[in-house]
Amino acid sequence: MKKFLESEIPDLPAEECLFHIIPAPYEKTVSYGQGTAQGPGAILEASYQLEAYDGISCPCERGIHTREPKHSLESIEHEVSDVLRLGKLPVILGGEHTVTAAALKALKDSGEEFGIVQFDAHADLRDTYEGEKLSHACVMRRAVDMDIPLFQIGVRSLSVPEVKLRAELGIPYVDGYQIGRHGIPENLLPEGFPEKVYVTFDVDGLDPSIMPSTGTPEPGGLNWFQAMECLEKIVRNKVVIGFDAVELAPIKNLHAPDFLVARLIYNFMGLIARK
Ligand SMILES: [Mn+2]
């Protein structure tokens, strides 16, 4: 696999790089379209087309180190732990959404107090899915089980038990239709949300018109500028301790969505690096 932005970045030793990319081509429980195992490779390949200058600055000057791909949840967790030990910022490239559970476990074990901001079309709050507890459709439920505060952005597909669970636990959210009608709220995250946040970006949170390359697309998602506005607001008010981009299932000969994810990651790095 290629390295993120390898064509442009200064050659810094790994331990000096702020961002540590962990490719996680894990795909076990995908329910509809397949192909997320090809996600990390496609993102890294597309990153070759990025410019070092993101429009405002050169985030790559802070160092981007791409690690070897990790294929199991255990090895992903181990890798994230290692990045955290170095005091650096893990960036996980999925793979199905389940990989987030591995990252959260590593963060939790490191003793970090944090909340999760989830971009997604789906709530992912089912207790089990097709008999599986560690499924992409259950990943945020596992976070709730770990007592990690959760905020959901762009959701528009939920089961009735998920709606009930949200109400029962008071899980805060700004759903797809709210964003469609009113845009991004001035104060995005609720008051009292943890100071440190992990951001999990399921690409199906975006509208299928710009993100067709995903297994379970849903109409009514975020557009590019809405996604950027959310990321800006998160970085402005919180400390991002890690993030992932998951569920990209590349479509052959359709490069725009792959490039979109590479660009989204790089812009997010820019916001973090400039803070
Ligand atoms: Mn998801």
Image (tube, grey):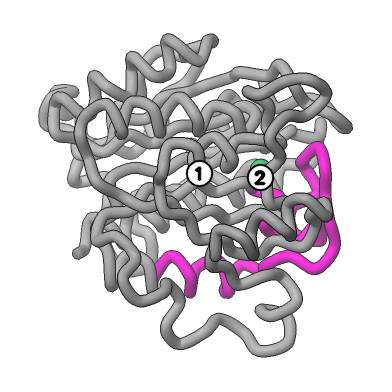
Q: Residue at x 73, y 52 (%)?
A: 162
Give the residue at mark 2.
125
Quarter of the image that includes the C terminus:
bottom left
Residue picked out by circle 1: 144
Q: Which numbered dot is residue 187?
A: none
Q: Answer yes or no: is residue 19 visible.
A: yes
Where residue 32 appears, x then y in whole percent? 88, 32
Judging depth in this view, the residue of 260 and 22 nearest the camera is 22
Tell me the element at label 2: loop
The residue depicted at 45 percent of the width and 24 percent of the height is 102
Residue range highlighted in magenta: 203-232
Q: Tell me where residue 96 sits by quadrant.
A: top right
The chief SS type of the magenta part is loop
Whichever of callouts 1 and 2 sits on the residue coming sooner in the sequence is 2
Label 1 close to label 2 by CB (< 8 Å): yes
For ligand 1, the image quadrant comes to top right
Queried on whether the Cβ of the residue with tag 1 lies below 8 angstroms from ligand 1, the answer reads no
**Front residue of this view, candidates 215 and 48:** 215
Q: Quadrant of residue 246?
A: top right
Farthest residue toward the front?
Answer: 168
Q: Amino acid at mark 1?
A: Val
**x, y percent for residue 72:** 52, 10
